[in-house]
Image (cartoon, rainbow, N blue to C red):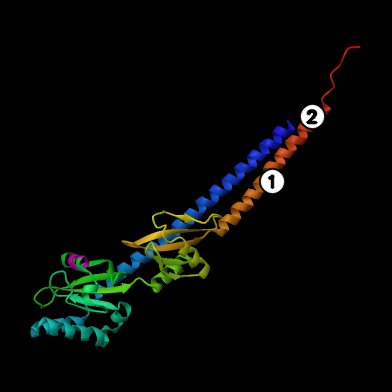
Amino acid sequence: MALAALGAAGLGARAVESRRVSRSRTEAEAAAGVAQRQAAQVVREAIELAEKRADEAVKHQPLVAEIKLLGEQRLESGDLAKRLIEWFKNDSSWQLFRQEFPVNGLSLDGDELAVLWGMKAEEFPSGPLVRQARQTGLSSAIVMGKGWPYTSGAAKLVSTFPRPVVVVMGRAIDNATLRDVTAVTGGAALLSDGKQALSGNGANAEVARLTSVVGQESSPVVRAPKGDWAAMPVPVAPGLWIWAFADTSRYVIASAAWARTATIGVWGAGALMAILALVIGLRRPLPVTGS
């Protein structure tokens, strides 16, 4: 009986440990899920901001006046592009737009950009973005400029130019974006192409841990062996992700404390049962034999 009680206590202790591990994993996954949703929201808000700024740009009277003037002058395409580039580059009224969104330009006809300040127009394939803006008035998306993701917005300006003009604005997803993610999630953030870390922000130790999971973007969640941290990827564009870090060490500490208390209780109960079994066994009367 005593051995049976101790054996049962051992099984109970193993069950407590199993429950502790499962609990730590569940809490780590939940914490990482919160960080992932927060990071995704930061990216969505950055894209929405690009659309908002494009909408403000088409209502910016100095730009509207410049486009109207150029339409009346009927310049050759090369001269027109030069004039617009100079305007985007130097006009003082455009400074705030230029600082916030370093890539900006115009589509005068069709889906192609006639002029772009910040990089060459052919390096910023914004055709679908422009097309949607022509159809609906506003659009936003991630555009890959020189192979790098840009939060981008476009808006249609109905002017006296031969056709409606579409204003396009873009800003790179860079360390500033990752800094916004870190500020919201409280953990590090890292941009990855699935092969290497492209940029990171946050505590060095956390960034190093995120770097170690690059290549596991197909996994919904990556947990540390001890469960003290977890990470989830946020798809940004084809072949690009932002990893969000969640420090779950407090859950590990809490579950370990619970496990210690539960294990002490299990072994205590087992020891008590074993003692009772021994006492009962020792007090059992000896068998009576005949003389």
- Residue located farthest toward the right when viewing the structure as drawn: 291
Q: Specify the amino acid type for callout 1.
A: Ile
Question: How many marks on residues?
Answer: 2
Instruction: Give, as a single range, the part of the protein colored magenta.
Output: 128-133
Reading the image, the residue beneath label 1 is: 264
* Residue 227, horizontal then vertical, whole percent: 54, 55
Q: Can residue 51 be seen in this view?
A: no
* Residue 251, horizontal then vertical, whole percent: 56, 56
- With 66 as the anchor, is 209 left or right in this view? right
Please tell me whether residue 181 is drawn above or below residue 3 in the rendered image. below
Which mark, residue 280?
2
Q: Which residue is drawn at 10% across and 73% down?
A: 163
Q: Is 14 contained in the magenta span? A: no
Q: Residue at x 22, y 69 (%)?
A: 126
| Disc 1 residue crowd, few under 14, some 14–19, many 20+, Cα 10 Å | some
Q: Can residue 140 be seen in this view?
A: yes
Q: Which residue is drawn at 70% across and 32% down?
A: 4
* Residue 291, horizontal then vertical, whole percent: 91, 12
- With 68 as the anchor, is 59 left or right in this view? right
